[in-house]
Amino acid sequence: MSKIGKFLLIFALVGAVVAAGFGYLEIQKRAQDAANLAQVQQAKAASDAAATKAKAEAADMAKAKADSDAKLTDATSKIDDLNTQLAAAKKAASDAQNGVQAANEATKTAQDKLDAITKTLNGQTADDLVAAAKKAQDDLATAQSEQKLIQDQLVQSQQQITDLQNAINRSKTGQMPGVSGKVTFVDHAWNFVILDVGLANGVVPNGELIVYRGHNFLGKIRVTKVDPNDSVAEILPDVKGDIQIGDAVLN
């Protein structure tokens, strides 16, 4: 074979190798494009599913809002109950204040008696003085104890007034900042639960709380009755799980 023939043969072989290489790269590119297309289609399907779910949740929220608006009138009557409790608390505070004044007077009287006995020795034996002094000291201790008790009652009454006033203000909007507690009783037949938190914890009528167990969201409840340390709430229709005793609640 001539040199030109050999050269042409080598050139042809090199061309074939190069063509095969480009063909392989083209196949790889098409495979990658196909994989990318599949990922895009999968992402679109997930996005469509999320959008459908979001629409359904939005519809549930709209229905829950409509139910809340329908029960606003009931919340107004509960506010009237809170106002009644507020009036009673104010009267208790006034009575406690009067009691503090009386206790202060009794304390002063007992102290005056003790001072007089200490300074007076005429016509009395040492035993009489000791007994009288002990009685005056006992009376003073009793008066001081009663004074502290009534002062504590006054502080409690004033705090109750503040809590009730705050509860009334929050009841108008249904807001319950920072409330958290647990379910202590469940009645699925009548669709309500009892909680271990009440007015003292910031719970107000018509306020809504979420119920969860661990990291799982179970549903929502709306407060219908509030006492100082516990409350009753109805289970809203959009509950996602079986609410049980011990489940946590928060807003």
Image (cartoon, grey):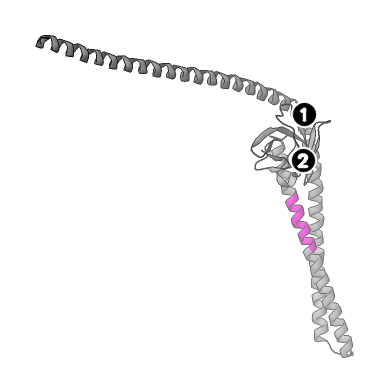
Three-letter code for the amino acid on which mark 1 is drawn: Thr
Query: Which residue is tagged 1?
Result: 73
Name, please, the residue furthest toward the left: 3
Q: Is residue 147 visible?
A: yes
The image quadrant of residue 199 is top right
Element assignment for label 1: helix
Q: Is residue 100 visible?
A: no
For the point 21% across and 13% down, which residue is it?
A: 13
Q: Is residue 138 left or right of residue 167?
A: right
For the point 89% across and 86% down, which residue is it?
A: 128
Query: Which residue is tagged 2?
Result: 245
Q: What is the CA distance from the residue labelled 1 to the residue labelled 2?
A: 30 Å
Quadrant of the drawing holding the C terminus: top right
Q: Nearer the viewer, residue 192 or 65?
A: 192
- Circle 2 Cα neighbour tier, 10 Å, few/some/many (<14 / 14–19 / ≥20): few
Q: Taking 126 as reference, is 189 above or below it?
A: above
* In magenta segment, residue 151: yes
Q: Nearer the viewer, residue 124 or 58?
A: 58
x and y, in percent, of residue 108 in the image: 79, 72
Please, what is the dominant secondary structure of the magenta stretch? helix
The image quadrant of residue 238 is top right
Q: Nearer the viewer, residue 3 or 207?
A: 3
- Of callouts 1 and 2, which one flags the residue occurring earlier in the amino acid sequence? 1
x and y, in percent, of residue 78 in the image: 79, 36
For the point 76% across and 60% down, which residue is it?
A: 152
Q: Are marks 1 and 2 in contact (CB under 8 Å)?
A: no
x and y, in percent, of residue 35 in the image: 44, 19
Residues shaded magenta? 149-160
